[in-house]
Image (cartoon, rainbow, N blue to C red):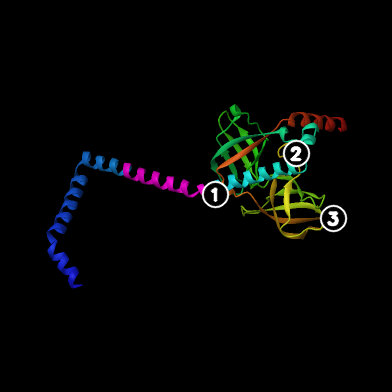
């Protein structure tokens, strides 16, 4: 305490100078329009620079997550390629007119420019539109799972009806150990990490941790895109069916980029199915 007092006594002139200087500066700024406007503009520059630095740091902090997603996706692609090589099935795949042929699908990468996750009806906006080949009803995925489907398109932007929307409904299948299918819905669930799979036959045996995939029945999503994992089974709804609760693999609150799915056979499939409906009508 004594040392602090001696320090203040020794440098008291400096402290008085700083105090009077600040008071003088405040009086000048408050009583002169030109000086006040100059001060405000300078403050805006400083604050803007500060926020720019903060935003840069935020982007930097998310690089680890983005890199992990890329590494996971590359690992999956390597695994699939290795499976083809190990099974000597590359020639067979190339010579077979399989509907699961990867060449059937194209993918358009887009950046997320707006995203909601906590609303009753959630939507996403991306920076690609009709000029990039995007059309309404195209499916949207990430390296982690399903995102939703394209709702509206302008030349440079597209809005996506998120999976976190009560009217979104996606055909899914349980893993390869069963032949069961169901409908994935978010419904009235307000949690962004969970959803329900409905209309699963009661006789199907399910377990916690079982993966859920897209069925490939629609033109929106390829078969086998992972959707989530079962966290609660045997939610009996009555009748011959039951529901399960799943943990979604897509982290909607961290979306930065998405893949918009372009099914090259979509038009042919839809026209044929429409013709069937007309004939039955």
Question: Disc 3 to disc 1, how far (Cα)?
Answer: 42 Å
Magenta range is 45-64
Q: Secondary structure at mark 1?
A: helix
Looking at the picture, does residue 94 appear above or below residue 3? above
Q: Can residue 279 be seen at all in this image of the molecule?
A: yes
Sequence-wise first label, 3 or 1: 1
Pair 2/3: label in front: 2
Q: Mainly helix, strand or loop, the magenta region?
A: helix
Number of other residues with Cα within 10 Å of mark 3, as a class: few under 14, some 14 to 19, many 20 or more: few
**Residue located beneath label 1 in the image:** 65
Sequence-wise first label, 2 or 3: 2
Sequence-wise first label, 1 or 2: 1
Please tell me which residue is depicted at 60% across the width and 40% down the height of the picture.
258
Horizontal and vertical percent position of residue 73 = 63, 44
Number of other residues with Cα within 10 Å of mark 1, as a class: few under 14, some 14 to 19, many 20 or more: few
Horizontal and vertical percent position of residue 48 = 36, 43
Please tell me which residue is depicted at 58% across the width and 44% down the height of the picture.
70
Residues at circles 2 and 3 in contact by the CB criterion of under 8 Å: no
User: Total of numbered circles in the picture?
Assistant: 3
Please tell me which residue is depicted at 19% across the width and 42% down the height of the picture.
32
**Residue located beneath label 2 in the image:** 218
**Residue located beneath label 3 in the image:** 240
Q: Secondary structure at mark 2?
A: loop
Question: Disc 1 to disc 2, how far (Cα)?
Answer: 31 Å
């Amino acid at each position: 305490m004594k040392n602090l007092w001696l320090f203040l006594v020794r440098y008291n002139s400096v402290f008085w100078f700083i105090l009077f200087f600040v008071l003088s500066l405040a009086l000048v700024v408050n009583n002169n329009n030109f000086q006040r406007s100059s001060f405000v503009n300078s403050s805006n520059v400083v604050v803007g620079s500060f926020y720019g630095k903060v935003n840069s740091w935020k982007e930097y902090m998310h690089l680890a997550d983005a890199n992990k997603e890329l590494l996971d996706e590359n690992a999956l692609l390597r695994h699939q390629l290795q499976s083809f090589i190990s099974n000597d099935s590359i020639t067979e795949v190339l010579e077979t007119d399989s509907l699961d042929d990867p060449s059937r699908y194209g993918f358009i990468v887009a950046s997320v420019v707006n995203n909601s996750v906590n609303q009753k009806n959630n939507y996403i906006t991306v920076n690609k539109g009709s000029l990039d080949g995007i059309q309404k009803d195209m499916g949207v995925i990430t390296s982690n799972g399903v995102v939703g489907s394209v709702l509206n398109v302008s030349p440079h932007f597209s809005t996506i009806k998120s999976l976190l929307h009560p009217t979104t409904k996606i055909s899914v299948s349980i893993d390869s150990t069963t032949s069961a299918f169901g409908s994935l819905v978010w419904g009235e669930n307000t949690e962004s990490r969970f959803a329900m799979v409905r209309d699963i036959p009661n006789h199907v045996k399910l377990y916690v941790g079982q993966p859920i995939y897209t069925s490939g029945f629609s033109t929106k999503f390829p078969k086998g895109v992972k959707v989530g994992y079962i966290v609660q089974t045997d939610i009996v709804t009555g009748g011959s069916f039951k529901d399960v609760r799943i943990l979604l693999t897509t982290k909607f609150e961290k979306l930065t980029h998405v893949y918009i799915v372009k099914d090259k056979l979509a038009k042919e499939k839809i026209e044929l199915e429409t013709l069937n409906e007309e004939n039955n009508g």
